[in-house]
Image (cartoon, coloured by chain):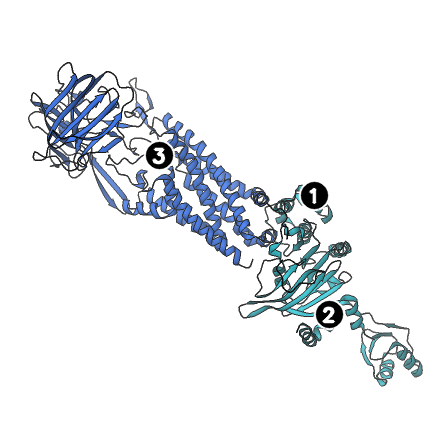
Chain colours: A blue, B cyan
């Protein structure tokens, strides 16, 4: 039998006509945009920061922006750096014979030495460093030993390559070497100073002729996470790492002498001592530091213990800074209203199907389209496309508007790459689209609007809210955002969970256990399974 | 087509041996009939007789346990652009209340690859006029029936299925729809129209399929049925009812009193009635052969439904 033309396009056209000709549904889609943008605006609108000015007036505070690397990524760049100038090509070699440290066992900032215990943190660092000057955020390459991750070559904050494993001790010292040829830095390590293993190379863009080279130590804040129902609480405090170096040798043109910072490196974070003083407070100021030399290793600073030997105690880190709610706003926080917009989209998507069952209109639809799978596919196409468009409009409006308002309020907005920003917006649209298809499928299965809407909200929105609102312990929150359709919200995460930075990478802190597209794929799997069941039931059931 | 037992090619709609159970209830119990082009076929039976289920099976909405239904020799599910093969009105209330009547027709037209121009044409025929732009939720049942018929006509189909289209229509609407259905049949279309009230089909149906308990009780042209029901009955108008009754009973007639001065006589021909009354000197003012109404014919049929069902199953077997 010659089949007359009956394109899928005409079914999509029919379903689109159905959707657009019910005013309530179109209003629902507009409400989705309003909710998404509106809730995003509540964040900065509700935060009021007033700071007194020198002239006595009040005005919005300017949140201090952290140092950034060349790509705009926020970084931490605090360490104790014993250094000298290297002009042109050359190398630095040093032997690290010991690495010890202190950290506040209870988290928080200890008073004096109380609460400080001996030990190095997993990402405490001591090693050699080649850096473009001393400005925070400048380019660098380092070969360093860590508390628990062996020797690493790290460069430009985000680069991290593994070298020799195992801890450092007098019995197992580590030889570290960096060579510079133009922009190319190559790191080596060795257990004996004669047999060297190349760890890796990094090309640092636009290095000047003169660099600072030397040995450094740093130790990131120690955080204690108390996990419970009702959320997890984090207390953190500064820690210290002390590296003992000898046989420090610089080859190449190296004019001048070693600069040995007796009192840390500028504005270190150290607040372990009474008064928390290091840096510009200076001797004699309030909270003057104790003599750093009197108790080596209890205060950031360095001492030369020989012509080519140094003991360096540092606090802080040379690493990318993880975005944290406390210090600024992430880009995705401007889309905090997504869940509400999603609910509106889910309601509309479910009703487009359940209303047909409720009114008996499904018979008209199926009589017009006896190949029922095509009817479902056409509905899914129209709803998915509508939800995607709505999501795109909402996200493309919310992100720039909310972040502009945040900046205007003096809040710091964390850097996100253009790629991440596009992914945030497109991913949010895709999240709504897939949720709409899931809602349609569930509605087809249960044929009752209230049941379908409740079911979809329970599987997407409830786990999302529970996981991100500091209600559940971090472990439970991670499983929820891994296994339930709420995993899809990972597509909005723009901050990177750095492997080389210890941080509270929990959903409530904005970090999802799955990568963005994998998280979205979890929702996709649920939607596909529901769609397959809906397709089967719709095909077999009497209408 | 892969049909083994070829359906009659003449039948616009062929229903063949449908059986369907809902739990313990047999909704369809061997339903079989044809709907021919160019006729209005009344599909009559009490509520629950299986009329609506049969229509849903014809439209591929419900799957029968046994049997099949064909539209022009093809199962509904294999029709492409089905509304151009058969138009249907199942439930006039099946509308999205917030959508305008015109937009209801528009999406249905789009699903068949038809455009707004075709919508305007059927709106013109339906007599809905300016009301077409209003929300369907505000429509009276009569307007919904007109809208449903307009929807059924969208694809200009050669066959139409209308389930209880007279429901909710005012007398003017009933007259309109009777005329409309007759006109459609006159154009050569096959029209199957169900009703639980035989009187609604009076003067409209050419053919009747009478059903009860999921199967066909009678499948007959209307003219034949009425002739059979009228069978030899004589209506007599007389002021002397008692004398007339006595005289006619004397020659074996069955006499029923149907009015203050009218009697109905069974079993005696009209010529014999005149002879007997004249012979007995009984006065009468009028004598006529009775023409049964469709309603009466239907009552006769259902009274004898057991025999009809037996005869019918004999034909099928």
Whether marks 1 and 2 lie on the same chain: yes
| CB within 8 Å, label 3 to label 1 | no
- Circle 3 is placed at which residue position? A494
Whether marks 3 and 1 lie on the same chain: no
Write the residue at 53% across / 40% down. Answer: A27
Dot 2: what SS? helix
Q: Earlier in the sequence, mark 1 or mark 2?
A: 1
Write the residue at 48% across / 41% down. Answer: A387
Name the side, left or right, on which A246 lies relative to A398.
Answer: left
Q: Position of residue A493 (x, y in %)?
A: 35, 37
- Front-lying residue, A95 or A407: A95
Q: Which mark is residue A318?
A: none
Q: Chain of mark 2?
A: B
| CB within 8 Å, label 1 to label 2 | no
- Circle 1 is placed at which residue position? B120
Mark yes or no: residue B91 visible: yes
Q: Position of residue B83 (x, y in %)?
A: 65, 51
Name the side, left or right, on which A341 lies relative to B176.
Answer: left
Q: Quadrant of residue A524?
A: top left
Q: Chain of mark 3?
A: A
Q: Chain of mark 1?
A: B
Q: Position of residue A263 (x, y in %)?
A: 13, 23
Q: CA distance from mark 3 to mark 1?
A: 53 Å
Dot 1: what SS? helix
- Front-lying residue, A214 or A460: A214
Q: Quadrant of residue B175?
A: bottom right
Q: CA distance from mark 3 to mark 2?
A: 77 Å
Mark yes or no: residue A448 visible: no
Dot 3: what SS? loop
Q: Position of residue B36 (x, y in %)?
A: 73, 61
- Circle 2 is placed at which residue position? B298
């Amino acid at each position: 039998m010659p089949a007359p033309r009956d394109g899928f396009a005409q079914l999509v056209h029919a379903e689109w006509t159905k959707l657009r000709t019910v005013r309530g549904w179109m209003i629902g889609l507009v409400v989705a945009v309003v909710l998404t943008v509106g809730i995003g605006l509540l964040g900065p609108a509700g935060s009021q920061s007033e700071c007194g000015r020198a002239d006595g007036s009040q005005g919005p505070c300017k949140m201090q922006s952290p140092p950034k690397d060349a790509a705009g990524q926020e970084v931490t760049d605090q360490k104790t750096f014993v250094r000298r100038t290297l002009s042109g090509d050359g190398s630095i070699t040093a032997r690290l014979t010991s690495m010890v440290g202190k950290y506040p066992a209870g988290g928080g900032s200890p008073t004096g030495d109380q609460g400080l215990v001996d030990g190095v943190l997993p990402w405490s660092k001591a090693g050699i460093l080649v850096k473009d000057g001393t400005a925070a955020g400048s380019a660098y390459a380092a070969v360093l030993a860590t508390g628990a991750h062996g020797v690493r070559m790290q460069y430009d904050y985000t680069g991290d390559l593994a070298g020799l494993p195992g801890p450092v001790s007098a019995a197992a010292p580590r030889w570290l070497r960096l060579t510079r040829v133009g922009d190319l830095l190559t790191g080596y390590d060795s257990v004996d100073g004669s047999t060297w293993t190349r760890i890796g190379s990094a090309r640092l863009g636009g290095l000047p002729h003169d660099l600072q080279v030397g040995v450094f130590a740093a130790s990131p804040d120690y955080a204690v996470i108390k996990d419970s129902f009702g959320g997890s609480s984090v207390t953190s405090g500064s820690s210290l790492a002390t590296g003992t170096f000898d046989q420090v040798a610089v080859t190449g043109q190296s004019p001048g002498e070693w600069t040995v910072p007796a009192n840390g490196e500028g504005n270190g974070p150290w607040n372990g001592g009474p008064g928390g003083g290091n840096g510009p407070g200076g001797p004699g100021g309030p909270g003057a530091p104790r003599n750093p030399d009197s108790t080596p290793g209890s205060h950031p600073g360095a001492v030369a213990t020989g012509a080519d030997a140094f003991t360096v105690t540092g606090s802080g880190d040379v690493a990318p800074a993880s975005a944290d709610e406390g210090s600024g706003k992430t880009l995705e926080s401007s889309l905090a209203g997504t869940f509400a917009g999603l609910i509106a989209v889910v309601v509309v998507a479910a009703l487009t199907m359940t209303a047909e069952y409720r009114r008996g209109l499904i018979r008209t639809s199926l009589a017009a389209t006896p190949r029922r799978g095509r009817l479902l596919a056409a509905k899914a196409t129209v709803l998915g496309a509508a939800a995607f468009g709505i999501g795109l409009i909402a996200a493309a409006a919310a992100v720039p508007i909310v972040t502009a308002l945040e900046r205007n309020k003096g809040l710091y907005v964390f850097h996100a790459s253009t790629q991440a920003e596009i992914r945030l917006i497109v991913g949010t649209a895709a999240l709504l689209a897939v949720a709409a298809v899931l809602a349609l499928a569930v509605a087809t299965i249960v044929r009752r609007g209230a049941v379908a809407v409740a079911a979809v909200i329970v599987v997407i929105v409830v786990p999302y809210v529970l996981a991100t609102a500091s209600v559940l312990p971090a472990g439970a929150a991670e499983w929820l955002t891994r296994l339930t359709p709420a995993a899809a919200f990972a597509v909005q995460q723009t901050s990177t969970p750095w492997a080389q930075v210890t941080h509270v990478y929990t959903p409530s802190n904005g970090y999802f256990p799955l990568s963005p597209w994998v998280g979205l794929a979890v929702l996709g799997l649920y939607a596909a399974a529901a769609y397959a069941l809906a397709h089967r039931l719709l095909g077999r059931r009497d209408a | 087509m892969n049909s083994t037992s070829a359906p009659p090619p003449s039948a616009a709609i062929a229903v063949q041996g449908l059986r369907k159970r809902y739990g313990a209830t047999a909704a369809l119990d061997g339903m079989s009939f044809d709907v021919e082009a160019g006729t209005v076929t009344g599909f009559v039976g009490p509520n629950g007789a299986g009329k609506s289920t049969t229509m849903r099976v014809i439209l591929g909405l419900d799957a029968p346990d046994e049997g099949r239904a064909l539209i022009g020799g093809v199962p509904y599910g294999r029709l492409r652009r089905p509304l151009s093969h058969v138009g249907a009105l199942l439930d006039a209330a099946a509308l999205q209340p917030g959508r305008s009547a015109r937009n209801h027709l528009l999406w249905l037209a789009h699903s068949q690859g038809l455009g707004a121009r075709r919508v305007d044409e059927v709106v013109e025929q339906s007599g809905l006029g300016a009301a077409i732009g209003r929300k369907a939720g505000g429509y009276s049942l009569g307007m919904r029936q007109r809208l449903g018929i307009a929807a059924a006509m969208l694809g200009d189909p050669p066959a139409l299925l209308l389930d209880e289209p007279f429901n909710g229509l005012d007398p003017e609407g009933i007259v309109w729809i009777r005329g409309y259905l007759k006109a459609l049949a006159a154009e050569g279309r096959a029209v199957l129209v169900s009703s639980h009230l035989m009187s609604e089909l009076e003067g409209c149906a050419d053919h009747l399929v009478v059903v009860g308990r999921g199967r066909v009780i009678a499948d007959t042209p209307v003219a034949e049925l009425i002739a059979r029901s009228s069978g030899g009955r004589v209506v007599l108008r007389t002021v002397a009812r008692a004398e007339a009754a006595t005289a006619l009973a004397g020659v074996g007639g069955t006499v029923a009193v149907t009015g203050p001065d009218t009697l109905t006589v069974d079993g005696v021909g009209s010529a014999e009635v005149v002879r007997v009354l004249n012979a007995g000197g009984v006065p009468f003012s009028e004598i006529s052969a009775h023409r049964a109404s469709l309603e009466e014919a239907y009552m006769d049929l259902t009274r004898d439904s057991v025999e009809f069902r037996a005869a019918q199953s004999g034909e099928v077997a």
